Amino acid sequence: MRTMYQVDLNSDIGESFGAYKIGQDEQVLDYITSANIACGYHAGDHNVMYKTVKMAVEKGVGLGAHPGLPDLIGFGRRPMQVDPEDVYHFVIYQIGALQAFARVHKASLNHVKPHGALFNMASKDRELAQAIARAVYDVNPNLILFGLAGGELVKAGKEIGLKVAQEVFADRTYQPDGTLTPRTQPNAMIHDADEAVSRVIRMVKEGKVEAVDGSDIAIQADTICVHGDEPSALLFVQKLREELQQNGINIKKVGTTGA
């Protein structure tokens, strides 16, 4: 009997701000199944949020809130000293903002995925992970929480009763403990598209990825992230989608099943 493989393809979008344009959101939306939309703290603004939600709804892409640290100048990628209660409050605030735009467009949010440093911090810090999971649950317990595969955020989501999606990264390298290599290190990113695609296929089919030290680590791939702010994002997501389908992997929005 043939094994059926299915995965979600997501991208962080809506990260333009005022006069500053980031990414190729309209084109990327043609190839992904879930959109993580910036909520104004690390990127995005009210105009960008409205436009991005509208485009995602028109293209049938799942809507996700992408809450980040309050750090526009650092694009939310700089770790900050934050209190779990503060995190709980600002995650609620950001989900609520995007939820309002979704309602205007007669749509509903499907998931929440923390951004950047907040995502990485919550992957390791149990208290921060619990604060985020509780915020998502208290806003809407039907939302799906995206977290780093095997990380604390996934565990916290499961414990509180949320559906979770374990996320893997196409263009990032992994440490032996399953965490992402910090962007401050020279080997954090994978720039070879063929290498990135082959790694993703292995993660989906074999449940394994090679860490930077050469060891194999177990990993569950429910959803794959492609960073929308990278210059090559559009070409890469096109190639990734095509290769996944050629390898018998169905691409479906998280929470849906079937061929």
Image (cartoon, grey):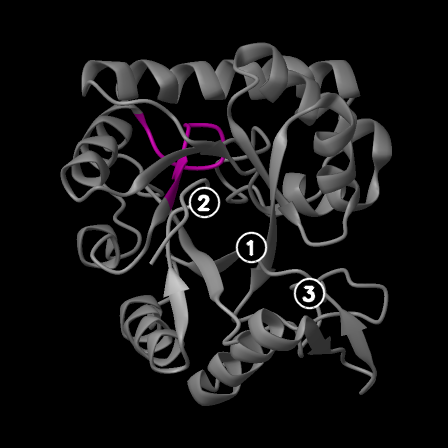
Left or right: residue 132 versus residue 101 is right
Q: Quadrant of residue 182 in the image? A: bottom right
Question: SS at mark 1?
Answer: loop
What's the magenta bit mostly, secondary-structure-wise? loop
Please state the extent of the stretch shown in magenta in the rendering: 35-45
Q: Write down the residue under mark 2.
A: 254
Say if residue 51 shows up in the picture: yes
Q: Write down the residue under mark 1.
A: 222
Q: What's the residue type where badge 1 is placed? A: Asp
- Along the polypeptide, which appears first: circle 3 or circle 1? 3
* Percent x, y of residue 177: 85, 64
Local crowd at mark 2 within 10 Å, few (<14), some, or many (≥20)? Answer: many
Question: SS at mark 2?
Answer: loop
Q: List the single residue furthest toward the left.
A: 58
- Near-viewer residue (256 or 3): 3
* Percent x, y of residue 76: 56, 41
Q: For the residues marked 1 and 2, what is the alpha-carbon distance in whole angstroms?
A: 8 Å
* Percent x, y of residue 191: 49, 81
Q: Write down the residue under mark 3.
A: 184
- Near-viewer residue (25 or 205): 205
